[in-house]
Image: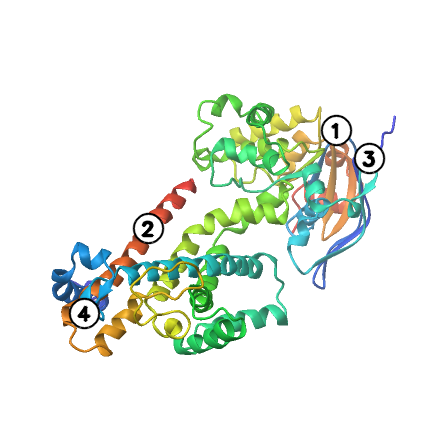
Amino acid sequence: MNTAMIRQRVAFSILGLLTLAIVVPILLVIVYIVVNGAGTITWEFLTAAPRQGMKAGGIFPAIVGTILLVLGTMLFSLPLGVLSAVYLVEYAHDNLFTRMIKLSVVNLSGIPSIVYGLFGFTMFVMLLRLGTSILAGSLTLAIMSLPVIITASKEALESVPNTYREISLSLGATKWQTVRYCVLPYAIPGILTGTVLSLSRAAGETAPILFTVAAFYLPRLPHSVFDQVMALPYHLYVISTQVPNIPLSVSFATALVLVALVFLMNLVSIFLRAHYRKKRLW
Amino acid sequence: MVSEPAIQTTDLNAYFGALQVLKGINIEVRKNEILGVIGPSNSGKTTFLRALNRLNYLVRSYSQTGEIRLAGRDIKEIRDNILRKKIGIIFALPQVLPVTIFENVAYGPKVHGTTSREQVEWIVEEALKKAYLWDEVKDRLDQPAVRLSGGQQQRLCIARTLAVGPEVILYDEPCSGLDPISTAKVEDAMQQLKLDYTQILVTNNTKQASRVSERCAFFLMGELVELGPTDELFTKPRDKRTDDYITGRFG
């Protein structure tokens, strides 16, 4: 074997090990959670409200709460994020204003989540008088999700070949028709990836919902968007640290449900992505 | 008999940033003629073509002065999308959208508001027939357009342009990536289209210009050096530079 071959082998081995270093911790976390929590998951645990100060019953309200928050977040952040990206990529000229927007987007992603929580509290809960509510919590999480959605959408739009735009415009389509029919459809897979990434994060965040929506103990379902809800990450925090004498396995089971929920979201996005990829006929 | 020119440019100057790429171009394009435009690279042929339907403005640093008239009307008064409906363009490399053959041709009529399925189908069929492609693709309209050969793709592009109902068709070196047989088919299509459309053919291939065009313009470094009947331009050019280019002494 010559030296080039040996070098190649060594390089591949190092790359392989690095890949393992990413995969193994994730697998360990999942295995650990499943081993410790799966035994506690029963039909009742998933579908009943907590009883006796969370010592018995299930986590149904928290599951519903998290799903509602994710949907609410998506409702606000997806249109705003995608349209911002469309503006930045397709319409905006390069000037001071757009550079400021781009800088803000980058900076937004660097803000700690507790700051979003406090901002959401003063802005939505106090100033706009939405109260601690699903609406206030969703808006807070939406602002937190925006940078990733905008950045991913921007990249997805920029990766659509310019020739598509040129073809469309040369046939007399308007700018908006061009974006709508010749650019956006091919950017959707990338946009989906970014959206699900940031929504997954929103689903697991505790700090932004702490003061804006999350209920410590509320064993019923919300009636309107102005109600508080329980949410899985906050519930997990509460039963792990605030309430004594709750078996550890309940915490693990709650964590497992949260992870499964996020995984489910990812799965849906994978199917959607595949569906939209098929539309692009090569 | 002199009818109103299909296109007329007056003192057309074009710039990319500070660089002037067209210098005082005055051209009249007659109705239903094929005007050949020849010249070496960087002579401004493509810029001239793309000035006519304002595609140059997609480049932000572009600016132009002078006047362009389409059938007597200043194109500044025509909205971009309407202008480009009237003046279609075929690009150098066949550029198809990543959709089916049918959808490629149907795209134009759809964005211009044709909604009934039967009408769109009729337009697509007519356009494909005019572009000499119908017989080759009629049984596989729902297949991806990228599976067609290069020559078929270019004729698909012609059909796509015809489907929006233009008055003028611009060709920007349409056969530069095609083999001789495909080139011949594209040229056949152009000859047939003369009945209904005014066509401008920019080409690097002087032989193609002499085969296809009735009149020919020679561009050099942003200037229109000479414009005349194609056979005259090729046999007894008035300008020495034209002669040099045609006889291959250029360099």
Pointer 1 local density, CA inside 10 Å: few below 14, some 14–19, many at least 20: some
Same chain for labels 4 and 2? Say yes or no. yes
> Where B113 falls versus B50 (above or below)?
above
Residue B5, labelled with which disc? 3
- In front: mark 4 or mark 3? 4
Q: Alpha-carbon distance for marks 1 and 2?
A: 55 Å
Give the residue number, with chain letter if any, for mark 2: A268
Give the residue number, with chain letter if any, for mark 4: A55
Q: Secondary structure at mark 3?
A: loop
Q: Alpha-carbon distance for marks 1 and 3?
A: 10 Å
Same chain for labels 3 and 2? Say yes or no. no
Q: Which of the 4 image quadrants contains residue B199?
A: top right
- In front: mark 3 or mark 2? 2
Q: Nearer the viewer, residue A209 or B233?
A: A209
Q: Amino acid at mark 2?
A: Val
Q: Which of the 4 image quadrants contains residue A149?
A: bottom left
